[in-house]
Amino acid sequence: MADGGGLAAPDGAERLAAVCAHLEEIRADLRDGPGGEHGPVERVLAAAHGGGDVVAPLAVLHAVLQAGGDPQGLDGYTDHAGAIRGLRPAGISTTRAEQVYLCPAGRCARYWWPKAAAPVPHCAISNSTLRRERL
Ligand SMILES: [Zn+2]
């Protein structure tokens, strides 16, 4: 209980966000890896779709990516996902009506700030576009 890491919201949410946001890259990585198959990431998606426990399949995927030569594994994909912590990134002002797009399945910690002319990203976990929320 004292080794940290337990404070991040839902178990696996940040790693799941990495899968959600980088699914195609992860699939490509797996294709190029020693196993050459998508099994590990498909099992994560199946668990997420079914509302099951994603922590174990995420750990497997992480290990497979590492075995494939990426020492950071899944954590190498968590770029912005690791910086969420309560959805109030430093530097985001609240002077405007801020909108943010979140994972529609509510399973992963992914978020996306609207960009002019950029299409709303697709959530790989729920197979629909991210849902809009007002902060
Ligand atoms: Zn998602």
Image (spheres, rainbow, N blue to C red):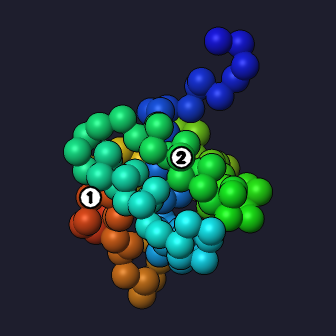
Percent across and percent down for residue 102 are 37, 55
Label 1: which residue?
Answer: 126
Reply above or below: 1 against 24: above
Q: CA distance from mark 1 to mark 2?
A: 21 Å
Q: Is residue 90 above or below residue 6?
A: below
User: Where's residue 44, x and y in %?
Assistant: 40, 51
- Residue type at numbered disc 2: Val
Which of 99 and 42 lies nearest the eye of the viewer? 42
Kindly give the residue lying farthest to the bottom in the view shown.
Answer: 117
Depth order, front residue of 95/72: 72
Q: Residue at coordinates 37% horizontally, 53% vertically from top-left?
A: 43
User: Does residue 135 show up?
Assistant: no
Q: Are marks 1 and 2 in contact (CB under 8 Å)?
A: no
Nearest the viewer among 51 and 82 is: 51
The answer to which quarter of the image holds residue 28 is bottom right
Give the vertical position of 6 relative to 12 (above or below).
above
Q: Secondary structure at mark 1?
A: loop
Residue found at x 65% / y 28%: 5
Mark earlier in primary sequence (1, 2): 2
Q: Inspect this view and state whether residue 46 appears.
A: yes
Q: Residue furthest top?
A: 1
The residue that mark 2 highlights is 60
At a point 44% along the width and 33% down the height, the residue shown is: 10
Q: Amino acid at mark 1?
A: Ser
